[in-house]
Image: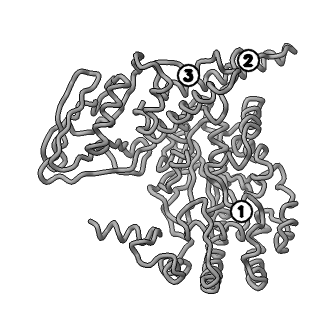
Amino acid sequence: MIAPARTSIRRFLRNIPRKISIRLLRRETNTTRRTGGGSRGWGSTGIGYGKITYMTLGTRIRLRRQMDRTGHIFSTASRDRGYSGRTGRSLAKIHEGQRWTATGGSGSSSTTTPGPTSKPFVSPPDPDTLLARLNTRRLYKRIKHYKSDAKFAAVQPYAKNKTVEDLAEEEWAALLARAKAMNTARMQKKQYVDPIPPVPSAHELLMFSPCPRPPAILASYPRSGNSLCRTLFERTTLRVTGSDMRGGLAKHDLVGEAAVSSQRVTFVKTHYPERRGNPPFKASKVVLLVRNPFDAIDSFWNLMMTNTHTNTVEFTDEQKVKAQKAWEEMALKELHVWKEFHIFWLEQDIPMLLIRYEDLIRHPDEVTSRIVRFVLDIKNMGSFFTERIDRCIREEQLEKLGSYKPRSGGIGKSLSKYTPEMLQRMSLDIMEVLARMGYPTELLVPDADLWQTMKPLDHYGVEWAASYPWPPKSVKKGEEWGDVPHMVINSGELVRGKEHETNWRAVKQSLGLVSGDSECTCYRCIAARKQTST
C-alpha cells in the first residue's frame, strides 16, 4: 500500500483511536539508487527505498509534516508495469542546501543532501499512488457515512491492519460470495437477508486487474462521454480503466491515467487517431463511443476555451461578433476531424461494439450491460453484474455518476449556436457517416425535442465481428491467450492535419480573454512557458 494522501491523514486521525498503530506501507521501485552524491545521488532517506517499511500513523504524519517543509516524494513506476511516465527512480525533491531527518518505524534515521550538480526531478504520481489516494478518500467517506446512518451503527467500516490492495480484493471476494448465497436462496425459493448492509457503491474500493489478452479500448472523439462510460464500467466491475494520456482526469477519480498494459487494466480510453497518446500499445477489441457532432464540437469548444471539463465560456456583447466567426471556422474544421475519425474506426478489421452517447445517458443500465458483456467476453451476464449495474445507477443520479458534473446533460442543447446555413452545410457533409452509425434522418432536423425521442440502437449497440474467429480457437479455458490478433494504437497517421488545427492562443487573444502568452492556458502556451523556464 502506498501511503494515504496527505490531505486525508488528519481525517483518519479523527476516526481512529490515537493509541492504535496502523501498518502503513510505502512501496518504491527496486531500481531506486541508494547511494549518496553523484549526478542523481540522493542517498537513503530512511523511509524504505527499494523495500517495504512499517510505520505507525503518528510517524507517518510527522514525516509528512517534515516533507511539507522540505519538498515531496514521488513514486514513478517502470514501463514494464504499463505506465507511460518516466521510469526507474523515486527521488526526493529537496531545496538545495537543506537537510532533513526522517525517523521511521524501522528505527532508522538518516539525512539527505542533494549532490552539487544534481537537479530536482519531479514526476506526476503513478497510477498505484493515485489509486491508493482514491481508495483512502473512499474509506474516509465510508466512515462518515457509517457514522451518519443508523443501520451501519454496529458495522465496522473496513478490516483493520490491511493494505488497501488487500481490502479491495477481500471486498470483491465478499461480493462474489454474497451473490452465490443469493442465487442459492433464490433456487431454494427462500428470501435472502444480508447479514450486514452492503457498502454503498460510491464507497467501494477499486483495484487493478491483469488481462490475459491485449486490452479492449474505448475509442471516442473528445467530449463524447468517455469519462461517464469509464465511471459506469469501474463502478460495475470495481476495476480501474486505463488511458493513454494524462488529461487531468485523476482529480475526477479516474486514476488509470497513463496505464495501458494488459498487466494492469482491461479497458483503456483513447482518442486516437484524433490525437496520439503515449506510448503505442496493443488492443484486441474496440468499443466505439459516438456522439452527434453538433453537441460534441460545442463541448470541445468550451473545453479548449476554458481549459476545463465543466465550465462554459461566456462573452460580452462586444466579443460575440468575433467569437461567432472563430466558432464557425473551428466548427467546420472539427467536423472534418469528427468525420474522418469515425470513418477510420468503421474500416478497421477488429471486433467492435458501437454505442451512442445519446443511448448511454437515456438507458445507462442497458448500454453498460452491453459494454461489460463485450469487454469481458461474457456470454451470459447472469444476476451478479445485472444487480451491480442496477445498484450503481439506482443509488445515485446519472449526473452524479460521471467523474464530473456535465455542462448540459441534454441532447441537442447546442443547436442554437449554429446558424441555419451551418446546420445545412454540416448535415449534408456527414449524412452518410451518420447513417452508418445508426442515426436516423430526424437528426438532420434542427429540433432538440425531436432528438430527445430518438430510438435507441437495436440491443443498445451494434457489434461487428472481425474477419478472424473470436475468441481464437487455439485458446482454451484458463490458458494464456498468447499473441492473439490485435492492432497497435498510437502508431499511425492522425486524421487531424495542420490545416484542421485551431490556434487557440490566437483566438483567446483576439477575443481579449488573455492579454498575453503568460496568461493563456492552452497546451501550446503551457509548453512554451516550460521551455522558456528551463
Q: Quadrant of the N terminus?
A: top left
Dot in front, 2 or 1: 2
Mark 2: secondary structure = loop
Say whether disc 3 or disc 1 marks the residue closer to the N-terminus: 3
Q: Nearer the viewer, residue 325 or 347?
A: 325
Location of mark 3 (residue): 158
Report x, y in % for residue 343.
Answer: 67, 68
Mark 3: secondary structure = loop
Q: Is residue 154 above or below residue 87?
A: above
Location of mark 1 (residue): 291
Report x, y in % for residue 238.
Answer: 61, 35
Q: Which mark is residue 489?
A: none
Q: Look at 77% across and 36% down and name the residue there.
A: 390
Location of mark 2 (residue): 194
The type of residue carrying mark 2 is: Asp
Q: Is residue 60 above or below residue 430?
A: above
Q: Residue 374, located in which quarter of the rendered image?
A: top right
The type of residue carrying mark 3 is: Tyr
The type of residue carrying mark 1 is: Arg
Report x, y in % for residue 247.
Answer: 50, 57
Q: Marks 3 and 2, how far apart in space?
A: 17 Å
Q: Marks 2 and 1, how far apart in space?
A: 41 Å
Say whether disc 2 or disc 1 marks the residue closer to the N-terminus: 2
Crowding at mark 3 (Cα within 10 Å: few <14, some 14-19, many 20+): some
